[in-house]
Image (cartoon, coloured by chain):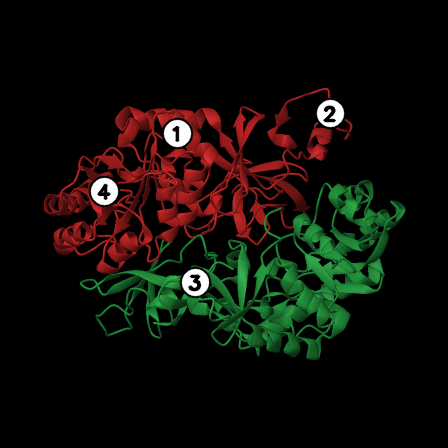
Chain colours: A green, B red
Amino acid sequence: MTTARTCAARRGTCDGRPRAYRDAVLIDDLPTPALVVDLDAFDRNVATMAARWPGATLRPHVKAFKSTALARRLADAGHRGFCCATIREMEGMAAAGLGDDLLLANEVLDARRLGVLVEGGARITVAVDSPETIAAAAAGGVREVLIDVCVGLPRCGCVPADAGGLAEQARAAGLMVRGVMGYEGHVVGLEDRAERTARGDESMAVLAAAHEAVGGDVVSGGGSGTWDLNHTVTELQAGSFLLGDTAYAKLGMPFEQALSLVGTVISVNREGGWAVADVGLKSLGMDHGKPSLAEPPGARVWITSDEHLTIGPPKGQADPPARIGDRVRVIPAHVDPTIAYHERMYVTRGDEVVDTWPVDLRNW
Amino acid sequence: MTTARTCAARRGTCDGRPRAYRDAVLIDDLPTPALVVDLDAFDRNVATMAARWPGATLRPHVKAFKSTALARRLADAGHRGFCCATIREMEGMAAAGLGDDLLLANEVLDARRLGVLVEGGARITVAVDSPETIAAAAAGGVREVLIDVCVGLPRCGCVPADAGGLAEQARAAGLMVRGVMGYEGHVVGLEDRAERTARGDESMAVLAAAHEAVGGDVVSGGGSGTWDLNHTVTELQAGSFLLGDTAYAKLGMPFEQALSLVGTVISVNREGGWAVADVGLKSLGMDHGKPSLAEPPGARVWITSDEHLTIGPPKGQADPPARIGDRVRVIPAHVDPTIAYHERMYVTRGDEVVDTWPVDLRNW
């Protein structure tokens, strides 16, 4: 692993030369910006979820983390079925030996790359919601499908009344229909728990009715935000609970923030009272707004630029909130598109870097 | 290049088998999401800018496009000096033989990777704005610097009154001070041209005064938004004009939108009246808000999800704005962080793909 020696030098632990005398790599040694995972918090999140959704009842969503190394840790914890949002994710998971039961929870019009995975011995299921996607699955060499049902989120999924007919079409095309899928994505982020419960129940009633018409063993759906509210699905499609972000933190769930983005202060303006860290728009998903700061405490994010974060002092103070060379810890507002910008996550225990998880499932 | 045959099949030009009988790859053949560059529009943008800022007076900003292939086209047009925002961009440009005059327009506390480029024969200049960054440049083996001056944007750059003293410190450390740099980033996006002019002039007066104190031949600054308003800098740091986005489109400049993101409609909901395309948060920089749609005309972006764009019909209409398999053309709200998500840009003339520009300068 490449390490930035200046930080160690700044801490007085070495003179800038390679430190062969100490094996441990510390977070302060990392080049920045660096995505850092707190492994103990991550493992606690896995355990909390597994207590409610053990083994195959949890189908972790690979789109949230895009890393086969992270996925392998989940497989070792007993979750060997995964769902993906892209064909690239499916290919990478199969190539990593994690192809026991892969669901592409998304529609595709060209399934031939999935057919190649079937030929290679992976179990591949794809979501279908139209005659066109059924035809594509059959033509591409996929053998198993779920009927994707719209349960209220304006996105993919058939009109509920069409589910049974589509299942018939799929079977007529020679496909095995494993069941249904429906994602209550319009519900999972609602901060009012009672509203999240009520609207989630409405969505799942739609899915259960569609399942009646479709048949099969699988009812797949849900997400981190409905992990303890959804009593309908046979398998939960959740991923964000593993690492967390500021949006999910508002839901009052028992999952911990396990991911942060570490930056270095590269400039300070004593007159204006701000500091500038080397993290920005190209290391942060911004659709949920600005990130937050875990360190320095109380400091506020003023501006997010391509490669910079301008940080103002805590309210009522005037001096810059950090010095040149200080590290900052940023909590992303949305974890999925944040990780998609990075090549790797550094896995840590306390201050020490104990592993690296390549983000090897990016792009399409 | 991988091509998606289903689209060609849908157009009736082939039966789904490889089309050896036709050499041309069309935009409709591309797997999606696909970043597509209109080469003629791009070349016109280059020519328009070069008429005002020829040769070395334009220092194109690599952060806007992160591609050595695109940079080489600019070098062939006479612009052989570039500026970068990351060390990775500097390394990639030097490795591609584009190291005649590379400016890292950003502060770093560990310049050793830049020193390696100097040893390799590249001309490397780095921005400094503090004793710490001067010390890092000297220790890292960099020989030339610009004094970065804050001209109003709350980001990097020294307090203007410090510029002369920092130049003395840099010279005392053995560094060649080529001049000053100051970026009026708080001004370049102002939609009111009179305000953009007035506030730009204020910023450049600050930079000119700092230049008096610092000396050297170079006054570097400006951006696409002040390309015809800035009369102070000796070299313009501009990049976004090359490809464009909806934010720059509001400024009424003579540059054309040369970049779009092509997606495929994978799902349609006849009851709700929406269509879903396979582009989303992981293919679009979202800090400037939602993207716009160039095709289908009049359709509106409702929701942007990780891998999906939900598109509603034009105002007053109720039917879905597209059919399954249709292509859509999305115009990003912010070009720089959009490109940073992609592995490549497809270069096109009319409907034909004539080249591919790898986005080879991502990450740090």
Above or below for B224 versus A65: above
Q: Is residue B170 visible?
A: yes
Mark 3 burial class by Cα count in 10 Å: few <14, some 14-19, many 20+:
few
Q: Residue at x 28, y 70 (%)?
A: A321
Dot 2 falls on which chain? B
Q: Using the image, determine if residue A147 lies above or below residue A108.
A: below
The residue tagged 4 is B196
Amino acid, disc 1? Leu
Residue closest to the far top: B21
Q: Residue at x 71, y 33 (%)?
A: B5
User: Under tag 3, what secondary structure?
Assistant: loop
Mark toward the viewer: 4 or 2: 2
Q: Which residue is mark 2?
A: B19
Task: Name which quarter of the figure residue A265 lies in.
Answer: bottom left
- Residue at numbered disc 1: B74
Residue position for label 3: A18
Residue A346, how many percent across, how many down?
Answer: 53, 64
Residue A60 shows in this picture:
no
Mark 3 or 1: in front is 3
Marks 4, 1 in one chain: yes
What distance separates the C-alpha of mark 1 from that of mark 2? 34 Å
Query: Disc 2 marks which amino acid?
Result: Arg
Q: Residue at horizontal 71%, vertical 73%?
A: A77
Q: Residue A178 placed where, x, y %?
A: 83, 58
Mark 4 or 1 closer to N-term? 1
Question: Where is residue A29 drawn, in percent x and y?
Answer: 43, 66
Q: Are marks 1 and 2 in contact (CB under 8 Å)?
A: no
